[in-house]
Each structure stands twice: as C-alpha cells, then as structure tokens.
Amino acid sequence: MPINSRELGEKPISKLLIQQALPASVGILVMSLNILVDTIFVGNWIGPIAIAAINVVLPVSFFIAALGMAIGIGGSSIISRALGAGDDSKALKTFGNQITLTLVLAMAFVIPGLIFVDSIIPAFGGKGNIFDPAKIYYIIVLYGVPFLALCMMGNNVIRAEGKPKFAMTAMIIPSIANLILDYILINQLDMGMEGAAWATSVSYLFCFGYILWFFLSKNSELKLNHFHFRLDFPILKEISSLGAVTLARQAVVSVTYLLMNNILFDLGGEESVTVYAIIGRMLMFALFPVLGVTQGFLPIAGYNYGAENFSRVRKSINTAILYSCVLGLFIFTGIMFFAEDIVRVFTQNESIVEQTPSAMRWVFAATPIIALQLIGAAYFQAIGKATPAFLLTLSRQGFIFIPLILLLPMYYGEIGVWISFPVADVLSTMITGYFLNREIVKTLK
C-alpha cells in the first residue's frame, strides 16, 4: 500500500491530526473567505438587497452541491476503511460508483430546478424587492452546480487517500478565481447580479478541472477502469446509508434557510433577511478551524477503525475534541468583542449595523462547546455506523433548532429566532456527548 494512506495508522495522532486538519482548515478558510468577500463585494458594489438575494439562492445550490458532498463523504468512509484493510478493489469500485451517482443525481435536481424557478424562489424567501435579483443569480449559478457537486465529491475522496494538501488546493482554486472574476465582472464591467453569478459558476469549473487532473495524474492511488463506473447495489447501499447523514444535514440546512428567510421577512422585511445573510456568512467563515479539525479527524478515525487499532481511534477522538474546543473559545471571544466592526465591513446601512451585532452574539454564544457535537457525529460516520451518525447529525438543526425557530418567535419575536441558536447547540451537544461516551466504553476498549 502506498505510504500516504499507511501513515494514517502509523504517525503520532497529534502530529497526524495537525497534518490532516491544517490543509483542510486552510481550504475551508479560503472557501469561506471567498463567500465572505463575495458578500462584501456584492453588498458594497450592488447593494444590501443583493446580499439577501444570494441568501435566498444558497439553500437550493447548497442542497445540490450537498449531493456531491454526501456521496463523497459516504464513499470516502468506505475507501478509508478499505485502504486500511488492504482491499484496494473495493476502494476503486466505490470511487467509480461515486462519480456515476453524483452525475445522475445532480442533473435530476438541476433540470426541475430550472423549470420551476418562479415557484422555488418565493418559497425560499425571495419575495418583494428580493425576487428579481435572486432569479438572475439562481439561474446562472444552477448551470455550474453539477460541477460543484463533482468537486465536493472528489475533494473528500482526495482526503480519504491521505492527501490533504491536494484537497486544500482544490478548495483554494475556485475561491481565488471567484474573487478575481467578481472584481472584473461586477466592478469593472458593471454586470451586477449577472456578474456575481457568472463569477461563481465559472469558479466551479476551475475547481472541477483541477480535481480531474489530480485523479488522472500519478498523484492518485485510485486508477479507474470503465467497469468501476457500473453501479453496484451493495456499494450504492453503503454509500447511500453513510452519505444520507451528510445529505440530511445539508437538506436540513436548506430547510432552515427557507424557514429563517420567511420567518424573518414576516418579522422585519428585507432588512431582517439581510441581517441573517451576514450572520450566515460569519458562521461559514468563523468556524473554519473547527470544521477543519473535523475534516482531518474523519480519515484518521476511519482508517484506524478499519485496521482495528482502537487505541488510536480513542486518542484521535480526544485530541480532536480538545483542539476544536480551544479553537471554538477563540472564535467566541472574537465575536463577542468585535461584532459591530465585523458588520460594518459588509454594509454601512445604519439600520442593519444596529440590528446585527446583538443577533450575532446570540448565534455564536455556545461556540466553545459545539466541537463535541461535530466530532461525535463525525466519528459514527467515519466508522460506518450510519444510524447513530444520521440521528446525531440531525439532532441540532432538525430535531431541536427547527422546532425552536417555529415556537420561540411566537412569544419573543425576532429575538426568539436568535436565542434558538445557542439553545439548540447546548441540547444537541449534551445528547451527542452521552452517545459518544457510551460508544467508547462499549466498542473501543
């Protein structure tokens, strides 16, 4: 077996986690900065309504991209364990099935998405003055989303091979391309929402080109033949059961955006939707180091579980939680002290600047403890236990957060929406901590 994947079972856990998490964190950081700066450009060069319009489109494009991510993470769990067990044939067959499945499902959602555009946008909160710019952005971005789905799938497979630096580069390329194209198309050519949308779609194509090059080059261990692309039901079932965890999480994120945009529009109009859009961008950006540790943890836990080296699995859990909690504390501190300064980077609209900081502080209030919830759910996914991974992943946003945002605003108005975030974080962390501890005692002794 090539040395890169074998190192997952040999190197010291602390060193290995940093080696895996750092490129993942940098990749997520650059991707998050891309979304953040893209929003800043749109807010300052087009206007605050444009920020709300992009926020309306995000859940649709995110869900289709999440198909690729779900297939990527589900299949990568199989690939990591197969490489750990020395079963290269299963790893190759899994990768081929991932590609076929991603293409079929992405197109199955994109085509209806384009046909029913006038119904989808209002359903996701694109009402009033938001509708027209949201429709422009939506149609163009949807053309590029199948490439994004393939990129999200391929990126996770690269990481499963134990090559995080290539995965990092795959995330950096579209981010840089998008920012350059934003400047040219929006600022220089004055193309408005069309420019923002084309910059996003073309950047996905750049990412796809790089990932395609990686797998065709000698850098990848996974060299496919045509028969690997034939769908294999047992592998599809395993990919689907594990990928359903990620897909369900992203589907719930999309539903959350739908509900939040509509609830906030009813409570405070376009301005409240813009407030949520800014906070949503900060959630994507600020949590990048915690998400990076989670991404780095997955192949380590999966490989060593496949190799039945349970002491290394236990140590990887403890180390990942420790690192993530420390990072979460730094994020929490920064948001608490600099919330207003952060908001002013996005817009100078005084009404939005006045409303957003307090809401942002509520949303990030439980950041120091969310590491346990993220790592706990990721562990069950990494070892191939789909049911607990599915339930724990949905516990925060699906089972707790959505009921809270439907209930609390009835009594507390808009502040009830923002309070829902830390309450959901605390409750879901307690639930995950219980099940993770029980699993460690029962299985990893």
Image (cartoon, rainbow, N blue to C red):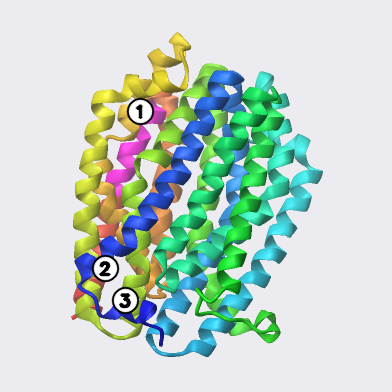
* Span highlighted in magenta in the image: 416-427
Task: Residue lying at the far right in this picture: please name it.
Answer: 115
What is the C-alpha distance between the residues marked 2 and 1?
Answer: 34 Å
Q: Is residue 64 visible?
A: no
Q: Where is residue 251 drawn, in percent x and y?
A: 55, 51
Q: Nearer the viewer, residue 176 or 24?
A: 176
Q: Which of 379 and 222 lies nearest the eye of the viewer?
A: 222
User: Which element carries disc 3, helix, strand or loop?
Assistant: helix
Q: Nearer the viewer, mark 3 or mark 1?
A: 3
Give the mark, 3 or 1, whose residue is nearer the N terminus. Answer: 3
Which quarter of the figure is the N terminus placed in? Answer: bottom left
Element assignment for label 1: helix
Residue 58, image x and y in percent? Answer: 58, 40
Where residue 213 sits in the image (x, y, percent)? 60, 66
> In what quadrant of the picture does the C terminus appear?
bottom left
- Which residue does the numbered mark 2 point to in the structure image? 16
Magenta: main secondary structure equals helix
Callout 2 crowding tier (Cα within 10 Å): few <14, some 14–19, many ≥20: some
Is there a contact, CB below 8 Å, between mark 2 and mark 3? yes
Front: mark 2 or 1: 2
Residue at mark 3: 8
Residue 13 is one of the magenta-drawn residues? no
Q: Earlier in the sequence, mark 2 or mark 1?
A: 2
Reading the image, the residue beneath label 1 is 360
